[in-house]
Amino acid sequence: MTNEEKTRRYRALVEECLKAQRFEEAITFYRQLIDLNPGDDSYRLGLAWAYHDSGRAEQAIACFEQIFEKELRGRIFTGFAFDELVRIFKENRNYERLVDVCERAVAAQPEDIALLGELGDAYLKAGRPGDAVRIFKEMTAMEPDASAFLCSLGQARIMNRDFAGGEAAYRRATAIDPAEAGSFLGRMAHVYLHAGQMEKAEEAFRQGLTEREGDPMLLMGLGDVLIQQGKLSEGSAVYERIMELDPNAAGVYLNRLGHTLARARYHLEAVGVFKRAIALDAQNPFYHIALSESYQSLGNAEAAAEALRQAQRINK
């Protein structure tokens, strides 16, 4: 049997094993294919996926790393293995290894702005906002009219506690793309939330609403941050405004308001809100479950059990 005939045979066996989720057998056949076709990285890529799907993450990473090293040496950076390594490290929150693989890719392709963006994002995830600022500044120098890069720079600066510099970057983005001003300001507000700056987040949401009056996402963000600051009446009033604008989705908004109150440990108020949601849609089991959890937090075990029974009846 020739190598070509053996290759066809092993490929058929691999496909059969993968369909049946017999990954260990597929791994064996992929190794045979690699021995027969040492220059064809598609089989090594398949082997990596078979390792991954069988739960052998480190073996999968080792295969992707081998392909990645070849990508780095190539005249054209294909990035197939790089993309998989980035995805795996992000999924596993392994940010040190994510930074390492991104740094190696940028070292090989320093002018690739997409790779720079991945590196900047990796630095943020790894808790290195100062390094992210450096990368995003480089990107904005390369493409000064790219509002998305300015937003990334603004995020990095805020996470690096340079609030004035962060806001300046977002303002430059809104000047370049004024139609997206409300969206950019909303993103800035969420970055401030992540940085623990509630008052600044509130102000950013309010500024965004001057650009996009009545935007439900901005209104919900504002309502949430008000409640997180203990401004219950103001936050609840914002949600009432949302429901006036979109009464058909009132139950959905009440559910979110209730969960926001519960996360802020205002369980008594949350109970009242979940009851309103149930009055609008008594057949939604999630409203009853949420009500049960707030009752439980209040120490009312009897009411919590009854709300849970209601949810179970609906699910039957």
Image: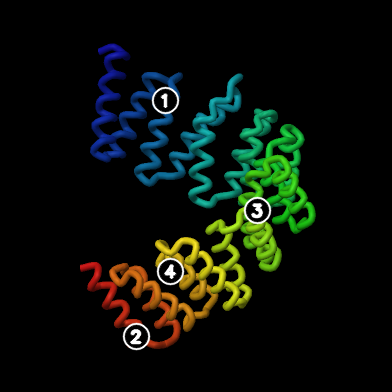
How far is disc 3 from disc 4 in space, using C-alphas?
27 Å
> Along the polypeptide, which appears first: circle 3 or circle 1?
1
How far is disc 1 from disc 4 in space, using C-alphas?
48 Å
165 horizontally vs 314: left or right: right
**SS label for mark 2:** helix
Say whether marks 3 and 4 touch (CB < 8 Å). Answer: no
> Along the polypeptide, which appears first: circle 3 or circle 4?
3
Tell me the amino acid under the disc marked 2: Ala
Count of numbered circles on the image: 4
Residue 63 vs residue 242, the one in the foreground? 242
Q: Looking at the rendered structure, which numbered label has been put on residue 211?
A: 3
- Name above or below for residue 196 compared with residue 267: above
- Name above or below for residue 281 compared with residue 54: below
The crowding category of the residue bearing disc 3, from other C-alpha atoms within 10 Å (few below 14, some 14 to 19, many at least 20), is some
Residue at point 43%, 44% (across, down): 57
Say if residue 126 shows up in the picture. no
Residue at point 29%, 24% (across, down): 11
How far is disc 3 from disc 2 in space, using C-alphas?
44 Å
Q: Pointer 4: what residue?
A: 255
Q: Pointer 2: what residue?
A: 303
How far is disc 3 from disc 1 in space, using C-alphas?
50 Å
235 horizontally vs 165: left or right: left
> Along the polypeptide, which appears first: circle 3 or circle 2?
3
* Quadrant in the rendering for residue 70: top right
